[in-house]
Image (spheres, grey):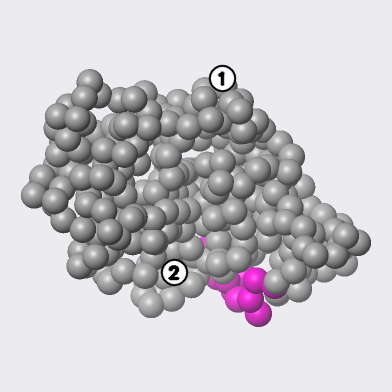
């Protein structure tokens, strides 16, 4: 049964070889809520901290600070996470690398059932594995196949089936449509939409494609250098982006067809450079070096604040840049 996911003040710092270095703050004081049965898309360029956040939620990384709650259960502590491991499942970015190439699809799907003691025996688990494949649009004949030789789209369906095997409360999807052709991308989008309808999933979708986020989510959060810079209803953010970074992302997504670009994107979609390496600066707006609207006030760190209804943005000049003003 799906449950609400709540993240409170979550941070993750990676420390290098030097004891004097402050480390790299890949995730910096992130607070988000995904209501039961809802999909929240976390968008941003590569290197902004999206995958680190989702892997911290999944327990692959230990959080430096903050809490992760599924329903009323805090899984930030590793001992608590072990007890509730089946509640949070991750669909990784590269499906082939997450599967044992020398073992069958049957093994991939029955292994989590054995680990979590789901099913009454071997035949029951094999029956469940066949049902899982059918739920993601694959024939039970695939159970005897090896991952090698299968298409990316087929492998993505297998890892989604494996994630669903434990009947999770929260599903984490890390770039499920990256590095695939348009036909496969469309099939994966349709699969995920079907999963949302059938299982009423609480899910977090990680993507750098804001148009994919628009198709698959009800809410969207935009991340830049480890922090959330804008968050709110997906359609509102897409059609009326308030942070210059979000406007750049929306403008990039619609550049191929200017008729699709929301008027709010406008000139604020222009930015220079790429996501810097080395982590977030100590003070000030991290996006300021790339922002066409940076001013003296941007030397102070902006707070994430309400800009209307459930819409929030972290920009000192958000009211001045509001296209509706």
- The majority secondary structure of the magenta stretch comes to loop
Mark 1 crowd level (few <14, some 14–19, many ≥20, 10 Å Cα): few
What residue is pinned by disc 1?
72
Is residue 114 in sight in this rendering? yes
Q: Is residue 94 left or right of residue 236?
A: left
Query: Residue 20 location in percent, x, y?
Result: 91, 61
**Residue 253, disc:** 2
148 to 80, vertically: above or below: below
Evaluate if marks 1 and 2 touch, with contact meaning CB atoms under 8 Å apart. Answer: no
Q: At 42% across and 70% down in the image, what residue appears?
A: 254
Query: Residue 257 location in percent, x, y?
Result: 36, 75
Q: Is residue 200 left or right of residue 294?
A: left
Chain part drawn in magenta: 261-276
Q: Secondary structure at mark 1?
A: loop
Foreground of the two, 177 or 104 = 104
Q: Secondary structure at mark 2?
A: helix
Query: Residue 173 location in percent, x, y?
Result: 42, 49
Mark 2 crowd level (few <14, some 14–19, many ≥20, 10 Å Cα): some
**Residue 5, disc:** none
Foreground of the two, 121 or 312 = 121
Residue 148 in the magenta stretch? The answer is: no
Which image quarter is the N terminus in? Answer: top left
């Amino acid at each position: 049964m799906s449950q609400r996911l709540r993240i409170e003040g979550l941070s993750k710092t990676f420390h290098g070889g030097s004891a004097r270095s402050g480390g790299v703050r890949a995730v910096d004081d992130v607070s988000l809520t995904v209501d039961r049965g809802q999909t929240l898309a976390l968008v941003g360029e590569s290197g902004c901290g999206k995958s680190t956040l989702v892997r911290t939620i999944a327990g692959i990384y230990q959080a430096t600070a903050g809490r992760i709650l599924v329903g009323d259960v805090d899984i930030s502590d590793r001992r608590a996470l072990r007890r509730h491991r089946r509640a949070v499942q991750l669909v990784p970015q590269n499906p082939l690398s997450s599967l044992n190439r020398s073992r069958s699809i049957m093994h991939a799907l029955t292994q989590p059932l054995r680990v979590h003691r789901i099913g009454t025996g071997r035949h029951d688990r094999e029956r469940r594995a066949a049902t899982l494949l059918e739920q993601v649009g694959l024939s039970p004949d695939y159970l005897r196949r090896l991952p090698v030789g299968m298409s990316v789209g087929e492998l993505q369906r297998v890892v989604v089936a494996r994630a669903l095997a434990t009947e999770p409360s929260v599903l984490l999807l890390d770039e499920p449509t990256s590095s695939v052709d348009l036909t496969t991308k469309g099939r994966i989008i349709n699969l995920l939409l079907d999963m949302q309808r059938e299982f009423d999933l609480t899910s977090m979708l990680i993507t750098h494609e804001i148009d994919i986020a628009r198709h698959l989510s009800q809410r969207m959060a935009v991340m830049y250098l480890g922090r959330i810079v804008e968050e709110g209803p997906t359609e509102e953010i897409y059609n009326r982006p308030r942070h210059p970074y979000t406007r750049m992302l929306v403008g990039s997504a619609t550049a191929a067809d200017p008729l699709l670009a929301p008027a709010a994107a406008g000139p604020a979609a222009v930015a220079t450079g790429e996501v810097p390496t080395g982590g977030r600066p100590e003070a000030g707006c991290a996006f300021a070096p790339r922002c066409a609207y940076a001013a003296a006030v941007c030397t102070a760190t902006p707070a994430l604040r309400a800009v209307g209804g459930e819409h929030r943005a972290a920009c000192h000049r958000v009211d001045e840049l509001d296209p509706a003003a």
